[in-house]
Image (spheres, rainbow, N blue to C red):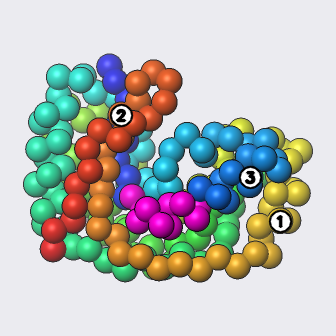
């Protein structure tokens, strides 16, 4: 079974700015895991599925994206989860919660989707450091980011299905929000 996940992609210009921050974290604090993916906002955590079901899932996501509205996203400064994750804050979670709920409802209709891999709560964010940020490095990294300002705005308009090849994630298909 192959590993997949679904996320919202950012515009390339903003992705490049965030990539610079991820590189800074990797160089200063030896936390490189977040560099493995482009900047994104996770809507469905990784799940396993037979590769033979890809076409059906892609069709489902195409139909889903055709009825979803684009919406504004505001990024504001930095946050953290415990002493492992540093991220860029997203304002107005309500729009993401609605999109996530709609996606979960759609995935309910996909018989190959494992119910155990769904999640009911979402905390939209863009990770800069995760998993490999050592607890000894965390205080310095958080001290660095908690006082910084970061502000950006963009339109949420593109979903992405990622696929893992056993070593790294790749974009399998992108889906434009149509409304």
Give x and y (percent) for residue 33. 63, 40
Residue at x-position 77% and y-position 71%: 146
The question of residue 115 being in magenta is answered with no
Left/right of residue 11 with respect to residue 51 in the rendered view: right
**Residue tagged by mark 2?**
163
Left/right of residue 30 with respect to residue 59 in the rendered view: right
Say which quadrant the C terminus sits in.
Answer: bottom left
- First in sequence: mark 1 vs mark 2: 1
Residue numbers of the magenta segment = 9-18
- First in sequence: mark 3 vs mark 1: 3
Residue at x-position 43% and y-position 62%: 12
Give SS at disc 2.
Answer: strand
Q: Which mark is residue 88?
A: none
**In this rendering, is residue 52 above or below 173?**
above
**In this rendering, is residue 178 above or below 128?**
below
Give SS at disc 3.
Answer: helix
Badge 2: how crowded within 10 Å, few (<14), some, or many (20+)?
A: many
Decide which of 76, 24 is in the foreground and name it.
24
**In this rendering, is residue 46 above or below 138?**
above
- Label 3 and label 1: CA atoms lie apart by 10 Å
Q: Is there any visible trace of residue 104 in the rendered image?
A: no
- Label 1 and label 2: CA atoms lie apart by 33 Å
**Residue tagged by mark 1?**
144
- Label 2 and label 3: CA atoms lie apart by 25 Å
The question of residue 11 being in magenta is answered with yes
Left/right of residue 96 with respect to residue 25 in the rendered view: left
Labels 2 & 3 near each other (Cβ < 8 A): no
């Amino acid at each position: 079974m192959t590993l997949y996940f679904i996320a919202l992609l950012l515009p390339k210009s903003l992705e490049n700015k965030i990539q610079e921050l991820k590189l800074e974290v990797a160089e200063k604090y030896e936390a490189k895991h977040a560099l493995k993916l482009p900047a994104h906002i996770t809507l469905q955590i990784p799940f396993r599925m037979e590769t033979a079901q890809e076409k059906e899932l892609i069709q489902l996501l195409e139909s889903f994206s055709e009825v979803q509205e684009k919406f504004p996203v505001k990024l504001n400064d930095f946050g953290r989860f415990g002493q492992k994750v540093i991220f860029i804050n997203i304002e107005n979670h309500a729009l993401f919660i609605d999109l996530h709920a709609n996606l979960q409802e759609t995935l309910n209709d996909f018989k190959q989707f494992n119910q155990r891999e769904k999640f009911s709560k979402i905390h939209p964010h863009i990770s800069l450091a995760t998993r490999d940020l050592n607890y000894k490095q965390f205080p310095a990294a958080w001290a660095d980011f908690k006082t910084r300002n970061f502000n950006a705005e963009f339109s949420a308009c593109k979903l992405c299905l990622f696929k893992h090849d056993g070593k790294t994630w790749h974009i399998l298909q992108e889906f434009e929000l149509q409304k």
